[in-house]
Image (cartoon, rainbow, N blue to C red):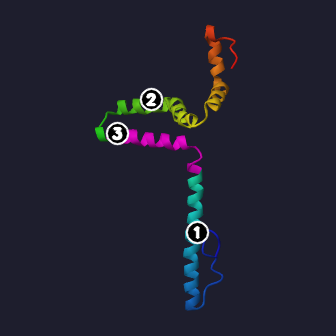
């Protein structure tokens, strides 16, 4: 028996007990291999939780449009809007994580995210120390 198959056919069980042990072993290792693959898929799917959230949002939009019988042009515009607003949705989603941090850390994240550049664009906020 190999990892991805049940053998090459050169060795076969000769008695009833060997056949039963081989069968049970094949089922157990098959389930173990399926468990390993399922865990790998789960890790890959959870690398970007927002992507999963956005996919659910797309699915919900598709169900909404299908259940209401919207015409094709409106469906296309709604999907296009959702994809064009992806960055905004991602930032809104990240706000929940930022809210869980202390005020000091929130400020540091804001500064490193470009808030200081925004302040330099406003004349009365120029050259203030963070």
Q: Position of residue 39 (x, y in %)?
A: 58, 58
Crowding at label 2, few (<14), some or many (≥20) Cα neighbours within 10 Å? few
Please provide the residue range marked out in magenta.
Answer: 44-66
Mark before the other along the chain sequence, 3 or 1: 1
Answer above or below: position of 43 versus 66: below
Q: Are marks 2 and 3 in contact (CB under 8 Å)?
A: no
Q: Quadrant of residue 128?
A: top right
Secondary structure under badge 1? helix
> The N terminus appears in which quarter of the rendering?
bottom right
* Residue hosting label 3: 64
Secondary structure, mark 3, is helix
Task: Return the residue at label 2.
Answer: 81
Q: Where residue 19 appears, x then y in whole percent?
A: 56, 86
The residues bearing labels 3 and 1 have C-alpha atoms spaced at a distance of 39 Å
**Image quadrant where one finds the C terminus:** top right
Where residue 91 sits in the image (x, y, percent)?
A: 54, 31
Q: Is residue 48 magenta?
A: yes
Alpha-carbon span between mark 1 and mark 2: 43 Å
Tell me where residue 20 sits by quadrant: bottom right
Q: Residue 4 location in percent, x, y?
A: 62, 68
Q: Is residue 78 magenta?
A: no
Residue where numbered disc 1 is placed: 32
């Amino acid at each position: 028996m190999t990892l991805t198959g049940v053998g090459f056919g050169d060795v076969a069980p000769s008695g009833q007990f060997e056949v039963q042990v081989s069968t049970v072993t094949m089922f157990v290792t098959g389930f173990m291999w399926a468990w390993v693959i399922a865990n790998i898929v789960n890790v890959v799917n959870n690398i970007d939780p927002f992507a999963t959230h956005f996919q659910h949002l797309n699915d919900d939009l598709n169900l909404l449009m299908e259940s209401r019988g919207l015409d094709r042009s409106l469906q296309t515009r709604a999907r296009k809007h959702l994809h064009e607003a992806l960055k905004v949705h991602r930032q809104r989603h990240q706000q929940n994580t930022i809210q869980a941090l202390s005020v000091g850390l929130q400020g540091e994240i804001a500064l490193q995210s470009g808030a200081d550049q925004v302040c330099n664009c406003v004349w009365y906020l120029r050259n203030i120390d963070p």
